[in-house]
Image (spheres, rainbow, N blue to C red):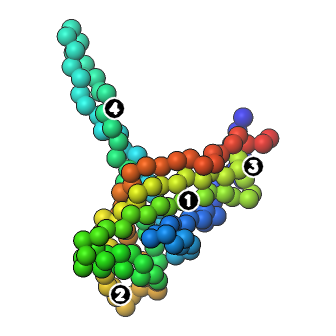
Amino acid sequence: MLLRAGDTISGSQASATAVIDGNVEQMFYAKALDAKLEKRKTVVKTLGGLAEQNKAAGWKGTGSLTIYYITSIFRKAALKYAKTGVDTYFTITVVNEDMGSTIGKQTITLFNCNIDTTTLAMLDVESDSLQEDLPFTFEGFDILDEFGKPII
């Protein structure tokens, strides 16, 4: 079976929402999001063996979010943390669905997301559209919908 080009998923067909302080935020300003699970491994040495073996011993969720510089929501969360010490954790749900593809959609929810760094102010006279990068961590995830197999 060959993969039909039409079954690849267009990145611009995705949608994302965030639940921040109980409010649902349509993340129409998102340009790119990449969330990864990184396993933490320990090295195990055994008698009679020359090779080091690896054993999974936990995981860490990290991500990067690039957005157009048109929302103050993350700056407001940074200000709340700076003034009160109360941090903001939120949930992000990403739906990848390309109506031209036969494989359906995938929906992933990331829990307890927390921004690492936030741009407070920016300007750039040579930029047609300002963007900011928001690295983040997350502490849980779920797959609500998963891609199917292509229909031939």
**Count of numbered tags:** 4
Viewer-nearest of discs 1 and 2? 1
Viewer-nearest of discs 4 and 2? 4
Q: Earlier in the sequence, mark 1 or mark 3?
A: 1
Q: Earlier in the sequence, mark 1 or mark 4?
A: 4
Viewer-nearest of discs 4 and 3? 4
Neighbor class of circle 1 (other Cα within 10 Å; few <14, some 14-19, many 20+) is: some
Neighbor class of circle 4 (other Cα within 10 Å; few <14, some 14-19, many 20+) is: few
Viewer-nearest of discs 1 and 3? 1
Q: Answer left or right for 151 relative to 24.
A: right
Q: Position of residue 101 (x, y in %)?
A: 72, 53
Disc 1 and disc 4: Cα gap in Å? 27 Å
Q: Secondary structure at mark 3?
A: loop
Can residue 149 be seen in this snapshot? yes
**Quarter of the view holding residue 112:** bottom left
The residue tagged 2 is 124
Q: Answer left or right for 103 relative to 45.
A: right
The residue tagged 3 is 102
Q: Amino acid at mark 1?
A: Val
Q: Position of residue 136 (x, y in %)?
A: 36, 61
**Quarter of the view holding residue 147:** top right
Say above or below: 13 vs 81.
above
* Screen quadrant of the C terminus: top right
Q: Amino acid at mark 3?
A: Thr
Q: Answer left or right for 31 relative to 74.
A: right
Residue 94 - label: 1
Q: Earlier in the sequence, mark 1 or mark 2?
A: 1
The residue tagged 4 is 56
Asked if labels 3 and 1 touch by Cβ distance under 8 angstroms, the answer is: no
- What residue is at 33 percent from the left and 85 percent from the top? 122
Q: Position of residue 24 (x, y in %)?
A: 54, 71
